[in-house]
Image: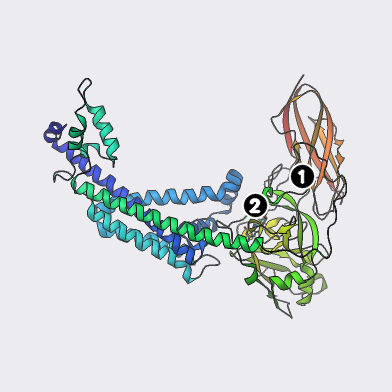
Amino acid sequence: MTDTRETDTPRTARAGAAGRRALGALAGLLAAAAGLAVGEPVSAAVRREAAPVTAVGDAVIELAPAGVTRWSIDTFGDSDKLVLEAGVVALLGLFAAALGVLAARDRRAGAAGALLFGLVGVTAAVTRPDGGPSDAWPSVAAGLAAAVVLTLLARRLPAAAGTGAAPDSASAGGLRPADAAATAEAARPAGTPDPGPAADAGQAPGTGPRRAFLVSAGAVAAGSGGAWLLGRRLHDGEAARAAGARASLTLPAPDDPAGALPAGTDLGVDGVGPFLTPNDRFYRIDTALRVPRLDARAWRLRIHGAGVPRPLTIGYARLLERELVERDITLACVSNPVGGTLVGNARWLGVRLEELLREAGVRPPSAGGEADQLVARSADGMTLGTPVEAVMDGRDALLAVGMNGEPLPFEHGYPVRMVVPGLYGYVSACKWLVDLELTSFDAFDAYWVRRGWARQAPVKTQSRIDTPRSGARLRAGRVPVAGVAWAQHTGIDAVQVRVDEGPWRNARLAEEDTADTWRQWVWDWDAEPGGHRLQVRAVDRSGETQTADVSGSAPDGATGRHTVTVEVTD
Ligand SMILES: Nc1nc2c(c(=O)[nH]1)N[C@H]1C(S)=C(S)[C@@H](COP(=O)(O)O)O[C@H]1N2
Ligand SMILES: [Mo]
């Protein structure tokens, strides 16, 4: 091996340069890791959302074209945020490695690049809709840490070949000592006796400048790990405090309880979910990379805007002193595809929004009110626009504080959210609500509307087959076909099923809870052998039969009939 190195200088030189580049890339990655790690404890001191990856991820969500957001929800569902953050980190890694290679040639350029990255983070953080100047700190710290680490490591990079700096340069690529030993092993001609530990040590990589570099790299990695762990502990401490505060809350009993469910609302068919969706199984859709954990005691809601003669601000305790009603309401997401699961039914506890609005002096447009749009703002800067007419027409539009017998979970909007029967979530169900502004649809477009979704979005009558599942293999004979149907605030009057292109048959409907909730249904099918298509449609209380026209979820909700195909054997 030693001979080879001495007689093959050009190759060694090339390999040496490659080795230096590889170590440069490693330096870049470590600098980025150090930056992100240092950003963690600083973001814990400022706020979680300002951490560099979160801020950049949020900016990506904010800037992504509507089609991309929709595609990512369709493709990754609830994991969309994880995928996004992993993507941001992977991309950062690529750039960081390239920056490290650059730094190996030009330290100043490398450091400048690292600062530039910090600046990207700063920009993303302070331009958040709810961002402020202090949100810059985590990225400032991250950029500085990355620049310092990169400069430091670049300075310790062993020189390229020819200077004797890289005795092991034939194993370029940042191999660990163990790998290098393995390479030596593989390179030894078969039958040659193992030269033994002493000989191995003679060509081990950890000598001279390279060793010094690796020691520094190790120190940086350890320091980053420490900073990261400190950040995690601070974040976990904050999360635990927030969870403790929520857990110690007892909501008052409702003044107007929903009462026991009518017998027979839940058909209890296998494969159909419970009538009331448990909180931990309730779908979640929002743009928050970090679920806001607000402090209920510090929470305030402001109601103000056009045609509000008596603007008001109300805190959590005062809200709970008002008349509390309990209502079962089915919430649906406009992104829900036909047959999809972005719909759930919960028992909400809250204050009727209409009463608060009337106290503030608001009148609906039909009574001469000035504003036709109610814009809800959340603590994380989301905006949702709801028709004023809808929240004041007598329906149970709620400022909800409770969900299925407990304070709202953080994921579902703690401490206060809106729920309006009959409207898709994106035009009504603002979570982490902090502000209500009366305005007009002409004057303001809310978040999703700016991304091409409809201004007005009443829920479309829909039905879903939950059992059997598409692709199921069944035994011939009696098979219960069952699922749910919803037409919130209108009500479901009938559900019909057909097999292949056969006649529509009436399913048996479960008891109705209220017109604001979904309704279960079941139809007993005498299944005959062969491949079959099952299709469902609902008839709502306005007499409309759910349309067969197929349309995607944009801009105002998917239409078409849920169809499942099954295979029946003897
Ligand atoms: N603050 C905030 N509220 C929000 C959203 C959001 O992204 N941010 N998404 C809305 C959408 S699109 C839907 S469908 C419902 C979903 O409520 P859930 O997550 O409790 O099921 O919340 C609505 N409220
Ligand atoms: Mo939604």
Q: Is residue 256 above or below residue 472?
A: below
The residue to which callout 1 is attached is 274
* Three-letter code, disc 2: Arg
The residue to which callout 2 is attached is 284
Position of residue 200 in the picture relative to residue 239 (left or right):
left
Report if residue 431 is visible in the image: no
User: Residue 245: x, y in percent?
Assistant: 63, 64
* Three-letter code, disc 1: Pro
Q: In this view, does 143 lie above or below 22?
A: below
Report if residue 292 is visible in the image: yes
Camera-nearest residue between 360 and 262: 262
Q: Is label 1 in a helix, a strand or a loop?
A: loop
Camera-nearest residue between 125 and 144: 144
Q: In this view, does 145 lie above or below 440?
A: above
In the rendered structure, which disc, 1 or 2, sits on the residue that comes first in sequence?
A: 1
Query: Which corner quadrant holds the C terminus?
Result: top right
Image quadrant assignment for residue 189: top left
Image quadrant assignment for residue 405: bottom right
Q: Does the residue labelled 2 lie within 8 Å of ligand 1?
A: yes
User: Residue 220: x, y in percent?
Assistant: 32, 54
Which circle, 1 or 2, is nearer the viewer?
1
Image mark count: 2
Per the rendering, the mark at residue 461 is none
Query: Residue at 58% of width from left, 43% of height from top?
Result: 75
Query: Residue at 59% of width from left, 62% of height from top?
Result: 242
Image quadrant assignment for residue 376: bottom right
